[in-house]
Image: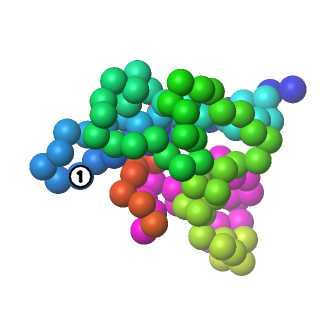
Amino acid sequence: MLTSVARFELRYEQPKRTPLAIGQLWRAFDRWWWFYTDEFRAQREVLPLIDFPNPERFYESTALWPLFVSRIPAPVNRRPEHKALTDEVSLLVHYGERCIQNPWLLRPC
């Protein structure tokens, strides 16, 4: 059964640097998927992410990886204005674009 389908792009954007599409995070069929973009695999300046060391591999998990979970403040369920945000996809869309722990942008696509 298809539930909560979503696609995000992780980008590296810094002043005076060319933006780089690092990879895509997908949610489909109750699983999370991660893969690097061709653009990332063709460059040599930015290293692979610790959670995803092999740029040639597709990663799959039933749980969202810590790299992305850290973008969701806890506990958001105590904030009355966010009661409609009940799943990780909605929380990533609402909170996940920027994170103080890393320079990458996560945007729905």
Which residue occupies 46% across, 41% down?
Answer: 48
Q: Which residues are magenta?
A: 80-100
Left or right of 58? Residue 37 is: left
Which residue occupies 60% across, 70% down?
Answer: 73
- Which quadrant of the structure image shows residue 45? top left
Which residue occupies 70% across, 37% down?
Answer: 32
Please tell me whether residue 22 is drawn above or below residue 50 in the rendered image: above
**Which residue position is annotated with label 1?**
14
Quadrant into which the N terminus falls = top right
Spot occupied by residue 86 in the image (x, y as percentages of width and height) = 74, 57
Spot occupied by residue 47 in the image (x, y as percentages of width and height) = 39, 43
In this orientation, which residue lies closer to the viewer: 1 or 40? Answer: 40
Please tell me whether residue 1 is drawn above or below residue 19 in the rendered image: above
Instruction: Answer whether residue 22 is visible to the viewer in this image.
Output: yes
Left or right of 67? Residue 74 is: right
Which residue occupies 39% across, 52% down?
Answer: 104
Instruction: Answer whether residue 107 is visible to the viewer in this image.
Output: no
Is residue 16 in the magenta section? no
Please tell me whether residue 65 is drawn above or below residue 24 in the rendered image: below
Left or right of 35? Residue 100 is: left
Is residue 89 in the magenta section? yes
Q: Amino acid at mark 1?
A: Gln
Please tell me whether residue 82 is drawn above or below residue 45 in the rendered image: below
Left or right of 103? Residue 2 is: right
Asked which secondary structure carries label 1, the reply is loop
Seen as rendered, the residue at the extreme left is: 16
Local packing at callout 1 (Cα closer than 10 Å; few below 14, some 14-19, many 20+) is few
In this orientation, which residue lies closer to the viewer: 75 or 85? Answer: 75
Spot occupied by residue 52 in the image (x, y as percentages of width and height) = 57, 41
In this orientation, which residue lies closer to the viewer: 73 or 67? Answer: 67
Colour scheme in use: rainbow
